Image (tube, rainbow, N blue to C red):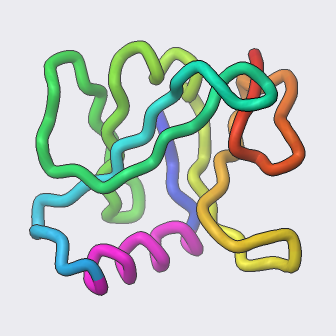
Amino acid sequence: MITVSENAKEHALKLISEEQKPEDTFIRVGVEGGGCSGLSYKLEFDNQLKEGDQQFEDKGIKIVVDRKSFLYLIGTELDYTGGLNGKGFVFINPNASRTCGCGESFSV
């Protein structure tokens, strides 16, 4: 399962509203090769399911992950930070053995 923090929920709902996304919009989370640690996170709004997608809902936010990416993301929490080191969505991934300084890539 992938969970969502209260901060991430608030900011996701705000963005969905500001961007006037359809009511069936969900957050698509994925992993792709690249970044300084080997794997990079992908995060986008979507409303089209694909074959093999895994679906979750936490705190009223729907999260969809493709089957391959899910293997790297089991137990991950999507959070939002607005601190001095930057502002945006971050992944708290218990499967990552190493994370780069910017938090956008990881390795297992």
Q: How many marks?
A: 0
Q: Residue at x 36, y 32 (%)?
A: 65
In the depicted structure, whether residue 23 falls above or below residue 76 = below
Identify the image quadrant of residue 19: bottom left
* Magenta segment main secondary structure: helix
In the depicted structure, whether residue 68 falls above or below residue 95 = above
Is 13 inside the magenta-drawn segment? yes
Q: Where's residue 102, x and y in %? A: 81, 50
In the depicted structure, whether residue 97 falls above or below residue 101 = above
Nearer to me, 53 or 38: 38
Q: Is residue 20 left or right of residue 28?
A: left
Q: Where's residue 88, x and y in %? A: 63, 67
Q: Is residue 78 left or right of residue 83?
A: left
In the depicted structure, whether residue 20 falls above or below residue 12 = below
Q: Residue at x 23, y 50 (%)?
A: 46
Task: Find the magenta span and give its range.
Answer: 6-18
Q: Residue at x 64, y 24 (%)?
A: 34
Q: Where's residue 36, x and y in %? A: 79, 29
Image quadrant in which the C terminus is located:
top right
Is 31 inside the magenta-drawn segment? no
Identify the image quadrant of residue 90: bottom right
Q: Where's residue 54, x and y in %? A: 30, 27
Q: Residue at x 16, y 27 (%)?
A: 50
Identify the image quadrant of residue 105: top right
Q: Is residue 24 left or right of residue 61?
A: left
